[in-house]
Image (spheres, coloured by chain):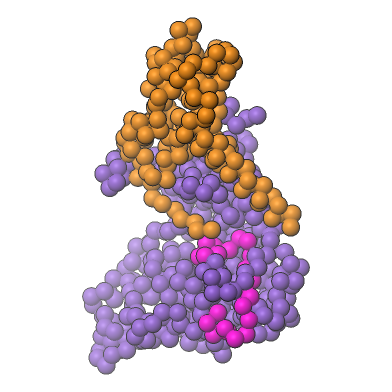
Chain colours: A purple, B orange
Amino acid sequence: MVENVKELLKAHAGLKHEVYLDNENSSIVPGEVVEAMLPYYNQRAYGNPTLTHKPGWEAFEVIMESAQRIAGFLGCKTLEEVNFTPGETEANNLALMGTALSMKDKGKKIVISEVEPINVLNVTEMLQKSGYVTTKIPVDNEGFINLERLKAAVDKETVIVSLSTVNHEIGTIQPIKEALKIVKDQNPQTVFHTDASDAYGKIPFNVQDLGVDLATVSSYKILGPRGIGALYVKERVNIEKILEGQIGTQRLWPGVENTPLIVGFTRASELTFQNFEQNTSHLRKLRDKLVDGIVETVPDILLNGPKGDRRAPDNANISFLRCEGEALTIELSLKGVYVSSGSACSRRLLQPSHVLVAIGRKFDEAHGSILMKVASYHTEEDISYALEVIPRAVERIRGITGSTGAE
Amino acid sequence: MNVSRAPLPYNPKILELFRNPKNLGKMEDATVTAVAGNPLCGDMITFYLKINDQDVIEKASFESYGCAANIATSSIVTEMIRGMKLEEAWNISYKSVAEAVGGLPSIKFHCGILAVGALKRAIRKYYTRKGAPPSWLSAEPSFEEKQALEEEELAKALSRRMKLEEGK
C-alpha cells in the first residue's frame, strides 16, 4: 500500500505550481503560526499546567491568556466559557453527548438539519441506540434550513438543537439568530448548539449577539494547526464531560493540555482577526475569480449553494456534469491543484455527499462535484493557475465519459 | 449511515491506465454495444465489440463514467479480450481483471465486477440477437451480470428513496 503511494507521489514530480484548495479537509499552517508554537515545545511552558513548578505555571499562564484571546474573538463573557478540545469532531461530540447526559431526565429528542457535518450526524445515530429520536430539518435548494419545520420539530422533550452557522460544503450562512429564537420560544430549556467552524474568522460571528448556548470552533479552518479546537459553553449552561481522566485546566476535556497547539490556534486567530475585513474581502475576491473563471470556460456545470452575501466568502462548490468527481480530483492533483469531491466513489454504498442530495442535486450531479476553499495566503496567480488547469482536466475526464450515460 | 473515506493508494498500473487509457472511445462500426452501471452510482461503462463471423473479438473499445479504478479496469478488459473467441472471453472473471491491473483496493472490487459485467452482457446480447446461444452460455446470469444488476437496482432504489424523503 505504501509502495503504491510512493509511486503516486513520484507521478507528481516536477510540478511547476501547486495550489491547495482542499481547506475543508486540512490546511497548511503558515510559518508565522509555526514560529509562535515552537518555543512551547522545548523552551518554555512545556510543563503540565496543573502542577506546582515554573514550567507548569508558564503553561497555565499561556493557556489562560490564549483562552482569553479566543474568548475575545468569539465575544464570550468570560474565558471560562472557552473549552479547548482536540478539534471540531471532539467539540461536536462533546456538545451533543454532553448535553444528552446532563439533560437525560428532560427528554429524548434531538433536532439537527439534513446538512450537518458527518460527526454531528453520526453522534445522533449513536444516541438513537440509547433511545434518542432525531429529527432532521430539511433545507431548500440553497441549503437554508426550513424554519417552519424547525418550529414544528421542537417541543418540551427536545434536549438539544444543533445547526451549523455556515454549511461546511456549500457555504450557506444560516439564519441562526432566528432559528435560536424559534427554538427558545418553543422550549426555553432546549440547549442550542452551533458548529461555527466555517463561520469563525470568515463571517461576523459573536456568541453573545447570537445568544447560542454552545458553539464549536476549529483551528485548522483558520490556518491554525490540526488537533485543536474549542467548544464555547455559555455561563450556567450545564453539560457533562464525555471522557474520563485527569481533569486539568479544561473542565470538559481530561488529559494533558497541548500547549503548543493552543498557542498556534490563538496565533492563527490573531492573524485572522487583526485584518478581518481585509482578509474576508480578499477571500471573496479570489473565490469570485475562481468561480467566474470556471463559469466562463467550462460548459455544463451547476453552482451548488447560495450566491453573494448569503454565502461564506471562501467557499466554492461546483458540479461538473458528465465528469466523475474522484477521477477529476486525481487528474487535478497530477497538475498540482488539490481539491475534494462529493462523489461516492470511495464508498460501496453509492451515496454521494448528503449535503448535495439534501439541496436536491441528483446523484449523478453530486458525483461530479468539487469543493474548493480559498485561503488568505492564496494569490491571484494561484487562482489563475487553477483556472488554467481545471478546464483541461474536466475536458479530459469528459472525454473518457464520452456518450456513456447520455441517454 | 456510516460514512467513511477510505484511502485509495492506487497502484502504478492503474495510474498509468487512468492517464493513458487504451482503446478509449465510441466505436462506430461495433457489432454489439453493452452498458453496465448507472450514472446514479457514479459508475457506468459502455463496451463496444467488433466481432467477426468466427465469433472472435476483432477489436474492443470503451467509454467510462467513473473513478480511476473504473477507467483502468475497463481499459484492461478491452486489451485482454482482443483476438479472443467469445467463449474464452466469457470465462474471464473479475478476479483476473483485478489481477491484471495489479490489484484493486477492496472497496473498488465492484469496478472490476462492473467491467466484466458489461463484457458478459455484450456477449449475451450478441447471441440473443443471433438467436442461437451456444451451450457454454448459461441461461442464468453470470456472477458479474447479477452484481451489475444489483448495483443498478440499489442506486435506483436509493435515488427513489431520496426523492420520497424530499417530498415528505
How many numbered marks appear?
Answer: 0
Q: Residue at x 36, y 72 (%)?
A: A261
Q: Position of residue A14 (x, y in %)?
A: 31, 39
Q: Position of residue A34 (x, y in %)?
A: 33, 66
Q: Position of residue A61 (x, y in %)?
A: 35, 86
On the picture, is A395 further left or further right than A208? left
| A389 drawn magenta | no
Q: Residue furthest top?
A: B53
Q: Which quadrant, please, contains the C terminus of chain A?
A: top right
Boundaries of the magenta span: A100-122
Q: Residue furthest front?
A: B135
Q: Residue furthest left?
A: A42
Q: Residue at x 44, y 17 (%)?
A: B86
Residue A150 falls in image quadrant? bottom right
Vertical position of residue A236 compared to residue A95: above or below:
below
| A106 drawn magenta | yes
Query: Taking the image as drawn, is residue A276 in sight?
Result: no
